[in-house]
Amino acid sequence: MDYPEILCRGLLKRCPRCGESKLFHRWFTIVLRCPTCAHYFERDAGYWSGAIALNGLVTGGLFMALLAAVLSVTWPHVPTIPLFIMAVIFNVGFSLFFFPFSKTIWAAIDYALHPLEPDEVEESYELVHLKEQMLVKHGDADSRDID
C-alpha cells in the first residue's frame, strides 16, 4: 500500500482505493460507493465525524495563521471590526469550500490506517461484477446506480 499515493488521492477528491474522481453528486453530497471499484465510504456509524473534525482543524489552523500574520502587521492598532468580519467570512467560506476535500482526505486516512476487511473486498467485487453484467445487458446503465 502506497500511503503518499492514497493521501494524494484524498487531497484531489478521488477514491482512495482506485483513484476514481467522480465521487460527488453535488458539492456536499458524496456517493455511497465509488462508481468504479464499489468502495463503500461510510464504513461505520458516525464515520464522517472524522471529516468534520478535520475540516474544523484545517479551517481553524489556517485562520490562526492568518490572524497571527494580521496581528503582527497591524499591532498595536488592530482593526477589530474589519478583522471580525473577515474572520467570519473566512471561517464560514473556507469550511464550506474544504468540506468535500475533508471527506475524501478522511476516507484516504481511514483506508490507509484500516485496510478493507475480506468481506468488504468481496462485497465490492460482487457489486462491480453485477454492474458489469448490467452494462452488458442494458447497454448504458448509469455507473452511479450501485449505491
Image: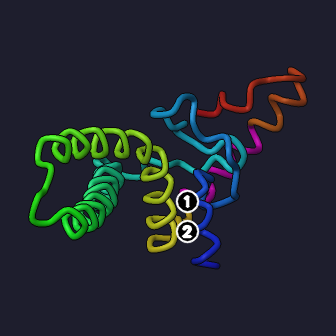
Range drawn in magenta: 120-130
Check the image and report above or below for 19 versus 25: below
Q: Is residue 49 left or right of residue 104?
A: left
Check the image and report above or below for 82 versus 72: above
Indicate yes or no whether the magenta region holds residue 129. Answer: yes
Q: Is residue 117 visible?
A: no
Secondary structure type for disc 1: helix
Secondary structure type for disc 2: helix
Residue type highlighted by circle 2: Leu
Check the image and report above or below for 47 versus 109: above
Residue 8 screen position, x and y as percent? 60, 66
Instruction: State the predominant SS element of the stretch in magenta.
Output: helix
Looking at the rendering, in which quadrant would you find the C terminus? top right
Q: Residues within 10 Å of mark 2 (few under 14, many from 20)?
A: many
Residue 135 screen position, x and y as percent? 84, 30
**Residue at position x 33%, y 60% in the image:** 58
**Residue at position x 28%, y 45% in the image:** 91
Q: Which mark is residue 7?
A: 2
Indicate yes or no whether the magenta region holds residue 56. Answer: no
Residue type highlighted by circle 1: Gly
Pointer 1: what residue?
Answer: 10
**Residue at position x 42%, y 53% in the image:** 102
Q: Is residue 116 left or right of residue 34?
A: left
Q: Of 122 and 140, which appears nearest the observer?
A: 140
Q: Of 97 and 53, which appears nearest the observer?
A: 97
Q: Which mark is residue 56?
A: none
Q: CA distance from mark 2 to mark 1?
A: 5 Å
Q: Are marks 2 and 1 in contact (CB under 8 Å)?
A: yes
